[in-house]
Amino acid sequence: MKKTLFALVSVFAVLAAAALFGCKQHENAVYYYVVFDTNGGSTVEMQKIESGKCAVKPENPEKGGGEVFGGWYTSKDYSVKFDFSTPITKETVVYAKWGIVQEGYCLVTFDTNCATSVQDQIIQEGGFAEDPKDELKKDGYAFSHWYESDEKQEFAIETTPVESSMELNAKWNESGIYEADFEDESLFCMNLYDDIELAEDAVAW
């Protein structure tokens, strides 16, 4: 009876500790929540992440009124972009930044899928984006092509006119060639969100 009572007390103590620190525990694993504040944009589901693991970059939210998504930030002053290769060790809220692309321009963003980051581009409607593939580097992988939503459908970046703002994703194939031996696998994921290089007066943030 005493052993049973002691066990019950221990269980309640663990649950109380988990509630106090804002995390969930299960089989010795600790979890934290990453909440996406879209700032008036479409809803993005929160993620439950095991401590020390990385959050998964969600699909970009959408917002009416001609506003375009400008990335996820660590605070509402939008001074520091959120790095999805950073391990989660506490409850986290990230904030969506929005800007208005001026008439006649389109914003082209690049998700390099944990490769070296490339700068986003502001393109005049009907113009062509520059292919930044030569800037990409991902250890153990060879770049294949860019795509919008279906990785099997290549987006011909240099011959397809840009008619609206879009995000292009990098498709990679394993090459088996490694130039470095990293002990920390998180080092394979660089910051995907360098500052956007904008044409003058093209976007109002």
Image (cartoon, rainbow, N blue to C red):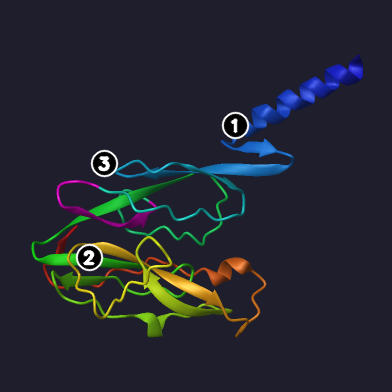
- Residue under label 1, please give it: 20
Residue type, numbered disc 1: Leu
Residue 184: image location, x then y, percent: 64, 69
Residue 192: image location, x then y, percent: 41, 67
Q: Which residue lies furthest to the top in this view?
A: 1
Which of discs 3 and 2 lies nearer the camera? The answer is 2
Query: Dot 3 surroundings within 10 Å: few (below 14), some, or many (20 or more)?
Result: few
Residue 36: image location, x then y, percent: 40, 45
- Residue under label 3, please give it: 40
- Residue under label 2, please give it: 107
Element at badge 2? strand
* Residue 198 can be seen, yes or no: no
Q: In this view, does 159 lie above or below 63?
A: below
Near-viewer residue (4 or 117): 117
Q: In this view, does 200 lie above or below 81?
A: below
- N-term mark: 3 or 2: 3
**Mark-to-mark CA distance, 3 and 2:** 20 Å
Identify the image quadrant of the N terminus.
Answer: top right
What's drawn in magenta, residue-wise? 63-74
Q: Residue furthest front?
A: 153
Q: Magenta stretch containing residue 111, yes or no?
A: no
Quadrant for residue 204, please give it. bottom left
**Mark-to-mark CA distance, 1 and 2:** 43 Å
